[in-house]
Image: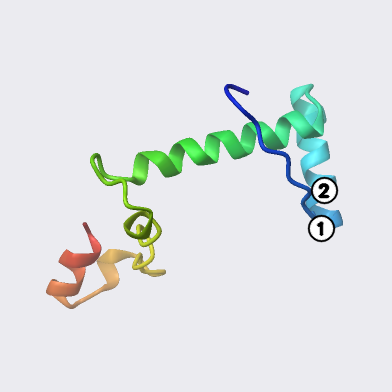
Amino acid sequence: MQGAATRKLIDIKLSVFEALSRKARRKGVSLKRYIEDLLEEDSRHWDNAVPEGVSDERIISLIGIAKPSVPLDSIEDERLNYILSK
């Protein structure tokens, strides 16, 4: 990890814990390190979704909120399809 770290106590369902433990063993790392790596990777993907120059936390919290749960190809309204494609 780079920079300062924040410690958090989290609850993980037993089935998730066991699955993550198996994956960590396969990679040859501790469960803690495996989860930290997953979270770091996920945060990097999220940072890439934020447009350059946007720094307002209120706006950033809205990014992705309007993404449809169906494929864009199945939406027949052209205006809605255009808006959701942005």
Left or right of 40, for residue 14: right
29 is higher (above) or lower (below) than 85: above
* Image quadrant where residue 69 sits: bottom left
* Residue 13 marker: 1
Rendering coords of residue 60 (x, y %): 36, 54
Is 86 above or below relative to 31? below
Q: Locate the N terminus by quadrant.
A: top right
Residue 36 lies, with reference to residue 59, above or below; the image says above
Is the residue marked by circle 2 packed among few (<14), some (14-19), or many (20+) residues within 10 Å?
Answer: few
Write the residue at 82% across / 38% down.
21
Residue 17: assigned label:
2
What is the secondary structure assignment of the residue under circle 1?
Answer: loop
Label 1 with label 2: CB-CB less than 8 Å: yes
Residue at 27% across, 46% down = 54
What residue lies at 81% left-to-right and 58% top-to-bottom?
Answer: 13
**Mark 1 to mark 2 CA distance (whole Å):** 6 Å
Judge left or right: residue 5 versus residue 56. right
Estimate the x, y position of residue 41 in percent, counting from the top left: 54, 34
Q: Residue at x 47, y 35 (%)?
A: 44
Where residue 4 appears, x then y in whole percent? 61, 27
Q: Secondary structure at mark 2?
A: helix
Furthest residue to the left? 79
Coloring basis for residues:
rainbow
Question: Image quarter for residue 75?
Answer: bottom left
Quadrant, the C terminus:
bottom left
Amino acid under disc 1: Lys
In the rendered structure, find residue 62 and report the number of the disc placed on it.
none
Percent coordinates x, y for residue 50 in the rendering: 33, 45
The residue at the far bottom in this view is 77
The amino acid beneath tag 2 is: Phe
Task: Check disc 1: other Cα within 10 Å, few if <14, some if 14-19, many if 20+.
Answer: few
